[in-house]
Image (cartoon, rainbow, N blue to C red):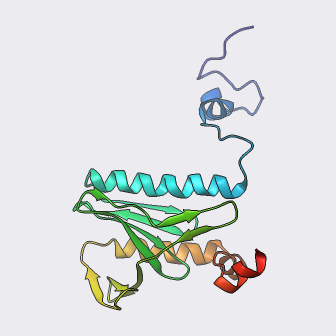
Amino acid sequence: MAKIGRNDKCPCRSGKKFKKCCGLLERAPRLETSQSPEQKMKVTLMDGVREIQADAVAKKAVCRELGVFFFYSTSAGDGWMLEMTQSDCVQVADKGEILEPPIDENSETIEINYSHMYALRDKKLVLTAYADKSERIVKDAPTREINAAMRRITKKYSSEQLEKVHVTETEHVKKT
């Protein structure tokens, strides 16, 4: 059997080069097929947290989206995870130091103990701490990118889908 070169036409007859078609599938990392959708989401969410933490340690200003989550890191080494449907957030890196994310996952849910609520006011990110209701303005936050992500997410998901993102304590008790 002849070896297929990266730039040869794909044997699946798609008309694309092998490297742009089935060759991508060969190189893609494979998750275990025995994983439940919740386990796959757990891996994906924690991967997003780890990636933004690594960017914060490297002091790179980066923005990423993952479902209803928005991650960003700053050149000062801060990293944040924002949940876009209910404006909750938690810091995952501080001045280049990784913070333990308060995420508890099981086979049915992912629970995140958010530390702050956020709002965009006058093109500034305003954080309100849940603990003491104190407010602070984050000067180097990517507010344009956060605003754009909020608009994309509300267009991408229906209101019914967005409502299913959050499970209240009473709903969780009823299911168990």
Q: Answer with left or right where residue 140 lies relative to residue 5.
A: left
Quadrant in which the C terminus is drawn: bottom right
Residue 154 against residue 42 in the figure, above or below = below
Q: Is residue 91 left or right of residue 30?
A: left
Q: Is residue 122 left or right of residue 36?
A: left
Q: Residue 86: where, in percent of width, then height?
A: 53, 82
Question: What residue lies at 72% left-to-right and 82% top-to-bottom?
Answer: 171
Image x and y of residue 21, in percent: 66, 34
Please identify the quadrant where the N terminus is shown.
top right
Residue appearing at x 24%, y 60% in the figure? 75
Q: Nearer the viewer, residue 89 or 66?
A: 89
> What residue lies at 27% left-to-right and 83% top-to-bottom?
137
108 or 41: which is nearer to us?
108
The answer to whether 12 is drawn above or below residue 162 in the figure is above
Query: Is residue 99 depicted above or below 89 in this figure?
Result: above
Pick whichever, 173 or 5, lies toward us.
Answer: 173
Residue 169 placement (x, y as % from top left):
64, 83
* Closest to the observer, 11 or 52: 52
- Where residue 13 sits in the image (x, y, percent)? 78, 29
Which residue of the protein is positioned furthest toward the top in this rendering?
A: 1
Would you identify the image quadrant in which residue 111 lies? bottom right
Numbered-mark total: 0
The answer to which quarter of the image holds residue 68 is bottom right
